[in-house]
Amino acid sequence: MGLAGVCVTTWESGLFGAMDSLFPALKWAAKACDDPETEGSMVEAYGDATEWAQLVGVELPLLGKAFAYSKIRSGLKCRLLLYSNPFLAWMHHGEELSGEVGDQSLELLEKALQAAPSEAEKGVTLFLRGAVEFVRMAEQARLEYRDYRPDAAIGKLAPTRYLFETLERVAERSVSRIGGSMADIERCKAARRWVEVVINRIRNYGRGELGYLPAFEVITNPRFMPHDQASWWLINKWANQ
């Protein structure tokens, strides 16, 4: 094509894509650009981390849906952290990750965590496992909330605060180790704060104190307004403008 070269940006090193987890892939890609017949696969280029790369980079995406290859950012990553409302991840992926796909992904990620040779690979794996676990705990909380058991629902959500604290420490270690964006640290803090907000809402309104029980996707939304039974902010065409 007559290209002068290739420029690789680091935008996706936010959202827990630590740079040192990408170096083997970048080196392999550089060789493949120069020689399309380069021997070996990108997975094999990971050396001691080959088993980890196979599990996370090949087998996990084969589960499809939330883990499928995408031409844009991962929807699971964005919904868990980028949009400051982790319950979006539950709303879009709750059903699939609470079932067989979730079971299989956790099994693969446990193997990947054991196979990870360094903090770089472990951090990525912990993020993926944390995303699945949050979605599953949120779904369990929804079921309790639906049946007017707010204390039980809060009990299901409470551990997610520690989950985001753990991911925050992973992000901090990543920045200290290899640099990159510090935004993930703040995103984890924001997610934990939002869980606290939702827990307080469930505590205040989870027994039908409003005369009705707001839907779980409503009470977890930043625009929830008590007594707005119609959720006008949601159904009007200008709601997201």
Image: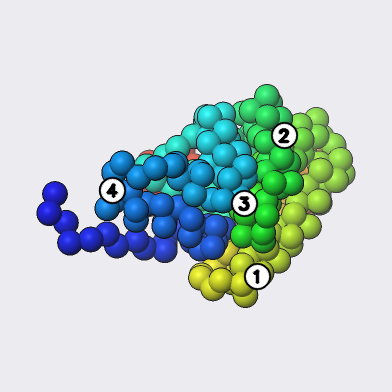
Q: Nearer the viewer, mark 2 or mark 4?
A: 4
Mark 1 or mark 4, which has the lower sequence index? 4
Q: Relative to the observer, which residue lies in front, 76 or 23?
A: 23
Q: Which residue is mark 3?
A: 48
Residue 117: percent from left, percent from top: 68, 55
Residue at image point 80% right, 30% down: 147
**What is the basis of the colouring in this image?**
rainbow
Q: Which residue is mark 4?
A: 35
Residue 135: percent from left, percent from top: 67, 41
**Image position of 157 with respect to 184: above or below:** above
Residue 87: percent from left, percent from top: 62, 46
Mark 3 or mark 4, which has the lower sequence index? 4
Measured Cα–Cα span from mark 3 to mark 4: 24 Å
Mark 1 or mark 2, which has the lower sequence index? 2
Q: Amino acid at mark 1?
A: Glu
Measured Cα–Cα span from mark 1 to mark 3: 24 Å
Q: Amino acid at mark 2?
A: Glu
Q: Is residue 64 visible?
A: yes
Residue 237: percent from left, percent from top: 38, 41
Measured Cα–Cα span from mark 2 to mark 3: 21 Å
Q: Nearer the viewer, mark 1 or mark 3?
A: 3
